[in-house]
Structures are given as structure tokens and as C-alpha cells.
Amino acid sequence: MAEVKRLDAFFDPCSVAIIGATKKIDKAGHVIFRNFAANKSRGIFKGEIYPVNPNEESILGFRCYPSISEIPGEVEAIVVVVPAKIVPLIMEEAAAKKVKTAIIITSGFREVGNVALEEQIVATAKKAGTRILGPNCLGVYYSKTGVDTLFLPETKVLTTGDEVIATPRPMSGNIAIVTQSGAFGVAALDYLAGRQIGISKFVSFGNKCDVTESEMMHYLLFDKETRAILLYVEDIKHGREFLRVAGKVTLKKPIVALKAGRSAAGARAAASHTGAIAGADKIYSAAFEQSGVIRARDMEEFFDAGKALAMQPPALRRNIGVLTDAGGPGIMAVDECESNGLSVERFSDETLQKFQKLKDEGMLPKFAATGNPVDLTGSVTDDMYEVAADIMFQDPAIDGIILLGLHHLPALREKYIDSVGLVASRYSKPIVMCDIGETEMALYTRFRFDKLGIPSYPSPEDAARAMAALVNYGAYLRKNGCLDEYISEFLKKRNKP
Amino acid sequence: MAEVKRLDAFFDPCSVAIIGATKKIDKAGHVIFRNFAANKSRGIFKGEIYPVNPNEESILGFRCYPSISEIPGEVEAIVVVVPAKIVPLIMEEAAAKKVKTAIIITSGFREVGNVALEEQIVATAKKAGTRILGPNCLGVYYSKTGVDTLFLPETKVLTTGDEVIATPRPMSGNIAIVTQSGAFGVAALDYLAGRQIGISKFVSFGNKCDVTESEMMHYLLFDKETRAILLYVEDIKHGREFLRVAGKVTLKKPIVALKAGRSAAGARAAASHTGAIAGADKIYSAAFEQSGVIRARDMEEFFDAGKALAMQPPALRRNIGVLTDAGGPGIMAVDECESNGLSVERFSDETLQKFQKLKDEGMLPKFAATGNPVDLTGSVTDDMYEVAADIMFQDPAIDGIILLGLHHLPALREKYIDSVGLVASRYSKPIVMCDIGETEMALYTRFRFDKLGIPSYPSPEDAARAMAALVNYGAYLRKNGCLDEYISEFLKKRNKP
């Protein structure tokens, strides 16, 4: 646990020095220092901050130091943005100062063939006990403490003179992003910010010369804010360690992996990108499966599965109920369920009778299909969703619900969102939803469901694939005898205000 | 051709009667009549409009007629929204009035077992030569003439009092939507409107008791505004006709099909939805392949492929160049290319030398990978995209380009969008692009590329699948000996101002 605690300095340092801080506006050393300075003045970053640059007296009102050694008092963490050839010297100074953690943003190491230079800084750090994130990375973003080493411009100015958001920061939430590719990392932030999905911590680890994806996942296992981990990797160097750590983490927290380089040409491209040998893709698939890591087929499934696993409990088994107000999209969801190894079986007689009773009482349309899918038809009203979802949750053969609420139908209002949310909160089975559309009412509907903890998706197939992640994770936990415990822990956290 | 011309009355009637028009605001008969009245007052709908309802004197200022027969002068088209049991009588009156086309919105026919009622209206119509769209459909939306039989509320009012768009109409463009499911149809409109993809015509054909998907595709073959057809079907009743017509259409215009009910459970659901037997899915796949119809795997691929085929020429062969400023996403695109049967081969020596020369001249970063993918790295500038794209287009072994322009990198501005557009316009090879992100700059970048006719996508894999549609369509046209002609026709239309 001491080693886990030591990594805290990456995310919540009492004091941080930015080595290579500068006044020059376009430089990474300026952007990063400005992030810290701004977050400190807002009272978010609570530690001390020190710009380090022998050529400056002060930066943004902060006294500038010529080197780490001249900073009075402790320096717990450093962020390094000086050129590669100077980094070994910086690490020597950091070692002398007993710096705990170093985020090395600088590139120009192993990824371009400078292996010896990288090994030199690792050796220095190891002797002193300094832990390194990077080099060749974007570092850390953690909204709660104001640690933000992203040097990409938060906004850009168009030729029209308009300033627009270019690299947004998502709101605070419970998904952790751990990524080998910095570019994919900021793209992920942009995606998640736009979709209003909150993150707990963002870590870009680049060349991982010291702290690896495995150690970071292990750290996040103990991170209270993180419920699900999204891992983007191009290669994994220490397979055995990965298997051991991932196998331990996934019993408590889901990991979704996007492994680039699955094709032969992709692996060739990956080799020229990171310098690492990507290895046979089948080996990765086997490793993920063995350690309970859910492998996403593409970027969208990566985010979609992460969102589902962060918001909903895993499923007990794989039989799904589909509840819809639109026949066609209901069929599309069913198709995708079967393609992903889920089943959509006809309901039991008991459930069918309950639906028949509702029809007889005029609560559901006479011609509504109720065999699974339940199709509430164009006559759908808010109340129908509530009663139908309740009946489906009650059926012991149903392990999860995909709800399609196409908002276009005339008598459907927004009331059903809250009532379905209330029904769902009384059960321990997962539910995901889909509304199709990209204009106001669709965006509003999906946003409202997300806020209630019911993950929403813009296509029936996306929703079905998200449910498949909940089912597959449930199957893994069951196989390992810890499904019940996971669900009960999950519900405890979910039901906390 | 006379039969094709006859269908014009669905889209551009000189006179239309709305049977079942009413003053009651929530009724379909009101919404549809109001659409016509509003479009007439705006000068978009140029024909005569007649509300028909024996219980009203006038509706929205238009004199109301008790029956079709009492309307003075010709009635070319009718829209029917009266209860199912009255429809046979209406069709008798329409026959007497020599009405050319009837859009029957009303449901309650074959889809709920009332087969005889449906056969009765078909018999009446056939004798008189009236063509029927529907029943149980949404009918037609055609922005240019103001025909809009969509009865779903265009806006809804939230409990906050805010009025929001619920069922938008996309702008005018060159993709036709032909759909069996009305609910999926409006969802498609909502999606396309939000993504700013324009449509030529929207047709929801429901029970297709008379006009089938095949006849509608044949009609669209002659429609100058339509470049690509998106077809959503749950069953196809007349397989031979479909093969014949689709095979003819796809030599001139691409058809992308989304066929719901591909799984066993999905087929069962489809049967209870439309009453049709969906048939073995393999047969559909074979029929689509034989007739050159591109089958989409899911909703997103359906729209993405349609957008690519409407905007870009098909590819000559299947070797793709990938140009990126972000290594990881580049690899993701390569992976998805290979998964979809495309290749991403290492460039020829000649092309490699051209890139080396640019590196030597300092035009490209020293460490840029240039073997395919070309990775411009985090040092990317606008100019690099322009020169790199040009070199790739020149390579005779490259059949199409996937461009990834992640906007986050500091020195990348918007200038490259126009310059890449200009380069691409000089070649007859397809190009698609991806920028990842859901906030301002990403949305702006993708919008700008779309406006230049370069289809943009939010994930590398989406872009790769869109390119696969261009490659597969090209392979089909080549097999049928009409690829060159198609491309030259396509470029003629594309280069028209």
C-alpha cells in the first residue's frame, strides 16, 4: 500500500515544480504552468507551485527558480517540459531533492530510438525512488485537485475571430481514462465532455518507462472516485504483471480496453508509432478474456461500455427484455443482442398474462406486441413505460432491460423518464436506453436518462452492445464467485445520495 | 416511363385532398393539413389543397368538403387519415374522381390481421389506376414542393415551458430515405437533421399494399436530386422484382440497406410487427450482394455509408492510404480497414522518396512515419496535410484516402480544410475524414469538411467503414463493367457549381 500511496503525488501533490515553465504563450511550459496558477488562484489547487527556468525572474507573478535545488522547502512532484537531452540532469536534481513523482511530458526518447537516454533517467529515478509518468505523454488531469498538465490549447480562434473550445475538460465523474496515446487521450476528453460523461482521473502514460498501465490500474483499484477504467493501449510489455493486476482489479472494478494494432497492417503502424512490438493480437484477446478485461471493438463501443459499467450493475445472466415504442428499432436491438451472444426469449406465461391483463384493462394498446420485445406502438404514453418496465423487471427470467424511448410519438412526454428511473432504482438488474435523433428533444431525453444513472445511447445497436458489456462482465464475476458481492457493493454506492 | 411519371403525384401534386382533415390540434388529420396549408401560404406548396370532412365548414381558412366527389375540378392526390373501416369507401370515391395517388396513413390493416380490408382497397385502386402508398405509413416529405404528410409533432413543450424540436425536417440534399418503419423513418430524419445531412425525398411505405420498395427505388433512379438511396426494410415480399430493380438501380445510384430481423429472435419480433415472414437472413444477404445493394451492419453504418456514397466517387480498388496527425487513431483506422477487407500497404519506393524529400526540406517532421499510415505527429501544421495528401493521391497504388485531422494539436488551424478540399477536387479518388470530439472545434471541423463534399466522421473506425462502402460499391460497378462511366458521371455532377 505504501507504493500505492506514493503515486498520490501524481494526482494531489503538496508542492509541484514545473521544470521548463516559461512566459512564452505557445509553449507547453507556459500552458501547463498557467493551468496550475489558474487553479491555485481559484482555490482548486491547494499546494505550492514553483516555476523553474534559469532565464526568468518570475512567471505569472510567481517567483521563478533557476533549478529545483534552489527551491526552499519540499518539492513533492515535478512536471518536466525541457528538451530531452536536459532531462537526465533534471532527474539528478530531482533525486537530490527527494522528489516523489515526475511527469515527463518531453518526447524524443525510446519512441524515436533514443533508448539509452530513457534508460539513463529510469536508472537515476529508481535509485532515488522517484516515480516517473511518461516520457512522451500528456500526464494527468484531475479536476478535484486542479492538477492539469495538458498543454494543448483549451480554445482556438477561428479566422472569423470566434474563439471555440478545442480541448475541453470533462466534468467530474467516476470513469478513469488511462491511455498510452496522448492524442487519443485528448480526443477522449473531447468526446466525453461533449457527451457530458464525467471522469474521475485522466492519465496519459506515453512511453511508460516506469509507471505502467498495470500499476496505474492497481492505483485506481483503491481510488474511491473511480468505478470503471477505460484503458487505451498499443502494446503491453509485461504480460504476466498485466494478467495478475488486471485479474485482481476486475473483481472489483470493470476495465474496458481498446487495443489498437489488431490487424497486421495496424500492428506494423503501431510498431512505427511507439517502437514497441505489438505482438499477435490473439494473445491480447486471450489475456483480456482471462483477466476479465472487456475488449471494445472500436472507439464508440469503448466509451459506451465504460459508461454502462460505471452507471449500472452487471447482469446475472444473458436473457434480455426489450421494451420499445417503435417496432423497427426494437428489432434492431434484438438483432444486435443475438449478434453479441445475448438472448431475447419469449416471456414466461406468467409475464404474458400480466401484459394481457393490462391490455384488457386498457392500460396498454390492444395491438401491442408483448412477447418480448414489448412494443407499446405509436399509441405509447408515459404511464405505459412505467408499468411495462416494472413487469419486465419482476420476471426472474429477465436479466436486464433495453428500453427504446423514441420521443417522436405524439402522446409520449418526458414524465416517463423519472418514473422509469424510479422503477429501475427498485431492482438490481441493469437497464440501458436508446432514443434516436440528434436534435433538441433527443439530446434532452438522453441527457435526462444519463442524469438518473440510466446510460443512454443514440442507436439501438449501441444500447445492445452496452448491455452485452454488462452481461459479459456479470458472467466473468459469476465465474469468479464474486458477482453477488459486486452487485451489492455497487448498489450501496449507487443509492448513496 | 408513364408508370414512373405517375408516381410524381406523390411528390408534386397539382391538387391534394386531405381526407380526415380536422380542427382538433392533436389529430394527425390536423397536423397534416396544417403542414400543407403552411407550406402553401409560404409559397412552397404550389398546388390546390382541399380539406375533406363532412363535419366541418372550413379548416384553417380553407373551405372544407363533405366528400372528394364534391370538390370542384381535379384532385390529383389524396392523403387519407380516416379510420380503417371507412377507407374502402374513400377509395371508391377516389376512383370515381380519377385520383392518381393515395397516401394512406391510417393503420389497422394487414399489420393487425385485417388482410381482407387491405385487399379490398387494393382491388378498388387497381381498377381505377390509383396508386397507393401505405397503408400504416407516414407517407412523404419533400422539402422542395412542400409535401409533408408527417403527423408527428414538430416540437414538444417540456414541463419547464420550453418548446424544443422533436421531429425536425432535414435540409434539402441528395440522399433519399425509403423506409418500411415509420418510427425508424422519423428517427432517421432527426438524426440527419442534427448531423446536417440533406435529403432529396423521404418515403415511408408501411404495409406496401401497392407501391413497394422496388417501385420506389425505380422511381428514384430517375430522380435528378437523388444520388444515393437509404432503404430500411423488415421484409421483401417480391424477391425477384427486387433483384431485377435493385440490380438496375445500383448501376447508376448506390443503395444502402438496413435489413432488420437478421437474428432468429429479431425475425420473430419482425413477424409480430409487420405480419410478414421475414425469411432466412442469409437469403437477404445473398440478394443484396447479387444486386449490388450495400448492406449496413447497423444504424450508424447505414447513415455513414449513405453519406459517403452521396458525396464521394467509389474507389477503383481496395488499397487505402491513411493520413493522420495522431498515431493511435491512425492505427485504429488501419485496423478497421483490414477488418473490412481493405488493405493499407506500405507505399511504393517512389512515394516514400517523395516523403523523404519533404522531410529533408523540413516540410515534414523528421520523425514523421511515412510508410502508410503517414503520421504527421504532434508537430503537424496545415501545410503538411496539403502536401502529404497530394503525394498520396498521386500514388497509382492508392485507391482512396482516410484523413484523420485531430484538431487538438497546437499548430493545426482550419486552413488545411480548404486546401485539402482543393487537392481532393483535382483527383477522382475518394477521400473521407475523421476528427474525434463532440465539442465546438470538432463539430466545426467536421461540418466544414462535409460542406466541401468530404464526408466526416466522429471515429476512425466510422471513417474506415465508410471508405469500405466506397470500395465495395466500386468493386461491384467494376465487375459490371460500368465503374469508369459511373465515376465520370459522378465527377461531372460533383463539379457542377
Image (spheres, coloured by chain):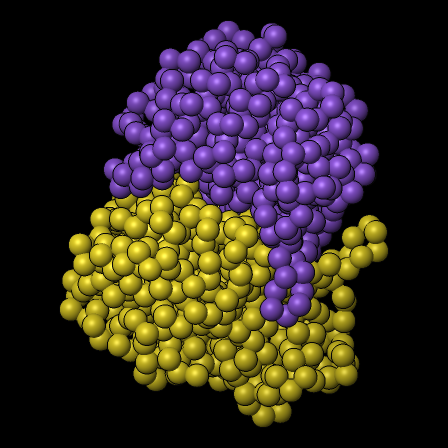
Chain colours: A purple, B yellow
Residue B219 placement (x, y as % from top left)? 37, 74
As drawn, A446 above or below B202: above
Residue A257: % across, % down? 45, 29
Q: Residue at x 50, y 12 (%)?
A: A127
Residue B122: x %, y % from top left? 44, 68
**Image quarter of the N terminus of chain A:** top right
Residue A434 visible in image = no
User: In the figure, A265 relative to A223: above or below?
Assistant: below
Horizontal relation, residue B66 to residue B374: left or right? right
Above or below for B169 versus B4? above
Q: Residue at x 70, y 74 (%)?
A: B34
State the residue at coordinates (59%, 17%): A96
The part of the image, by quadrant, that contains residue B350 is bottom left
Residue B313 picture quarter: bottom left
Locate residue B441, reporting x and y percent. 59, 57
Query: Which corner quadrant holds the C terminus of chain A?
Result: top right
Q: Residue at x 37, y 77 (%)?
A: B494
Q: Observer-nearest residue: B101 or B155?
A: B155
Compare residues A495 and A155 and report the one nearer the observer.
A155
